[in-house]
Image (spheres, grey):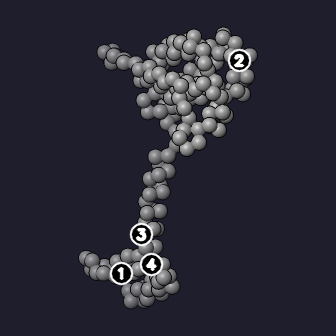
Amino acid sequence: MLSEMKNLWSYFYSDMEFMRICIYKRVGKWVFWSKRGVSLALIIFLVPLRISIAGENIKWHGAGLELTASIENVFLEYGVCESHNDCTKRNLVFFRSVDDGLDVSLYNIRDTSIIASVLGRCAKILAVQHIPSISIRVFRLSKQEELKRAGIFGEKVADKYIIEGKYAESNNSN
């Protein structure tokens, strides 16, 4: 036990400038407390915790892809894009799956009739897929112009719509 303590002490003593060592006896065991030990403990316990909560929620990802294709169809009908590929290249629609549904961003859209058609498509997909809510943010500028203009204050949303769905529980016990 004494040789182990000497080895630990020599290890800690080399970095005495960066740490404070307190040795105290607790329940019959020697405990070493240092800044390095605390840092190491934080890394060991908090990094895996952060990794476990990181990542994107993909619960509604399939519905988001379907919604994006439907919105691009609206853009094609109104002549905003020439093809689905053109809509994708111009970065007009973005979505992300969140816990309570989908968050959709539309860029470079100014015509209210296009927005109304998009809202109708969103409501249809919400009802078919039983999505709790869809949040739609409409921007007047393109994604690139918004990012340049945004700075530290963020993008300027022109219009924001939230469509929510309430669904009855099924009484069928199949």
Q: Quadrant of residue 144?
A: top right
Question: Which is nearer the N-term, disc 1 or disc 3?
Answer: 1
Which residue: 66% across, 10% down? 77
Compute the Cα span from label 1 to label 3.
Answer: 12 Å
* Depicted 48 relative to depicted 8: above or below: above
Q: Earlier in the sequence, mark 2 or mark 3?
A: 3
Distance from Cα at disc 4 to Cα at disc 3: 10 Å
Mark 1 near mark 4, Cβ–Cβ under 8 Å? no
Which of the two marks, 1 or 2, is nearer to us in this view? 2
* Quadrant of the snapshot with the N terminus: bottom left
Tell me: 27 left or right of 47: left
- What is the spatial separation of the Cα atoms under label 1 and label 4, in whole angstroms? 10 Å
Looking at the image, which residue is at 38% across and 78% down? 32
- Residue 81's disc is 2
Residue 109 in the image, given as x and y percentages of width and height: 61, 20
According to the image, label 4 marks what residue?
19
Q: Is residue 86 left or right of residue 29?
A: right
Visible residue check, residue 11 = no
Residue drawn at the location 43% of the way across and 88% of the way down: 6
Q: For the residues labelled 1 and 2, say whether their Cβ atoms are less than 8 Å apart.
A: no
What residue appears at the point 38 percent right and 76 percent down from the top-left corner?
Answer: 33
Q: Which structural element holds mark 4?
A: loop
The residue that mark 1 highlights is 22
Task: Residue 91 in the image: state x and y as whole percent.
Answer: 67, 28
Cβ atoms at labels 4 and 3 below 8 Å apart: no
- Circle 3 packing at 10 Å, graded few (<14), some (14-19), many (20+), is few
The residue nearer to you, when weighing 65 against 121, is 121
Kind of residue sitting beneath label 4: Met
